[in-house]
Amino acid sequence: MNVTNLNSLEPDAGDSDVLRPSFGSSIWASIENAIADDITSGRLTPGDKLAGEHQLAKRFGVNRHTVRHALAQLAAKGLVDVRHGLGTFVADTAVDYVLGRRTRFSENLSAAGLRGTHRLVESSVVKATKQIATSLGLRLGTLVYLIVAIGEANGRPITIAEHYFPARRFKGLPQRFSESQSVSRTLATFGVEDFTRERSVISARMPSKPIAVALKQSVQRPVLYVEAINVDADGTPVELGRTWFAGDLVQLIVSSEA
């Protein structure tokens, strides 16, 4: 999947509800993905009770053990709550994500009782476009690092983001990010112990197919898009971030104090 130009791709027109196991995937994983799509697409909403194991087994043409394994995986990722004697319910997992002067992915999720991790998807060196150059205070065409990473909460993808950094200042940054899986920890290795958010622009939009696939949601469900510039203690831009949040899973809170 080429995700370098995530924002330029047009959304696909509709997804099928038919279960289609991908090559090399197990049947229970395909069932897990199908039910997860029911949740992220809005066909199932927080608090809804899922069909029983017998009904789900009939729906997917499998035995109840396979269904039970898929439900266990969904529960481990926080998508459903299994209540013994009552059934399985869609979990209320919307995350309050604070956008403030010091926005930190892992800290935000930790405050919500979740484990936040980044998974590197792509890294490359690109020439700064006019918009990127202006945001980072660089000349047009200056080399910058592009890091594309998926942010996960307890193993569940809730963001996919493009991070742009001045290549000359942060030589070797992709390798350090690959090791730390954190923007703040990576910048700290270059002596940027603290950085603050200079500006955030928030909008809602429909996702392109690569974004929807990365977030494991339907292309028909909107995402929240945030474009932000982070600066060091001297006010020099160190990062331009473009982040797509799973709209059904995240509630953005703008704070002047955080």
Image: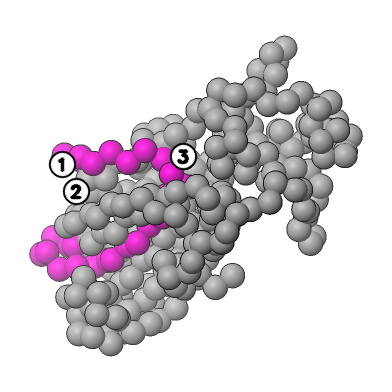
54 vs 135, left or right, is right
Residue 256, label in figure: 1
Distance between mark 2 and mark 3 Cα atoms:
22 Å
Q: CA distance from mark 1 to mark 2?
A: 7 Å
The residue that label 3 is drawn on is 249
Query: 16 or 23, which is in the foreground?
Result: 16
- Quadrant housing the N terminus: bottom right
Instruction: Name the image quarter holding residue 99.
Output: top left
**Residue 62 position in % (x across, y down):** 88, 38
Kindly give the residue lying farthest to the front in the view shown.
13
* Magenta-colored span: 231-258
Display colour scheme: one colour
Give the amino acid at mark 1: Ser
- Mark 1 and mark 3 in contact? Answer it, CB < 8 Å: no
In the image, 9: left or right of 226? right
Q: Characterize the local packing of mark 3: few (<14), some (14-19) or many (20 or more) Cα atoms within 10 angstroms.
A: many
Three-letter code for the amino acid on which mark 2 is drawn: Arg
Q: In what element is the residue under mark 2? A: loop
Of residues 5 and 207, the one nearer the viewer is: 207
Residue 164, x across and y down, in percent: 33, 70
Outermost bottom residue:
141
Q: Which residue is mark 2?
A: 101
Q: Are marks 1 and 2 in contact (CB under 8 Å)?
A: yes
Indicate the position of residue 60 as horizontal and vertical percent values: 82, 40
Residue at screen point 38% across, 57% down: 243
Q: Relative to residue 96, is residue 105 depicted above or below?
A: below
Say which residue appears at 80% left-offset and 50% top-offset.
Answer: 26
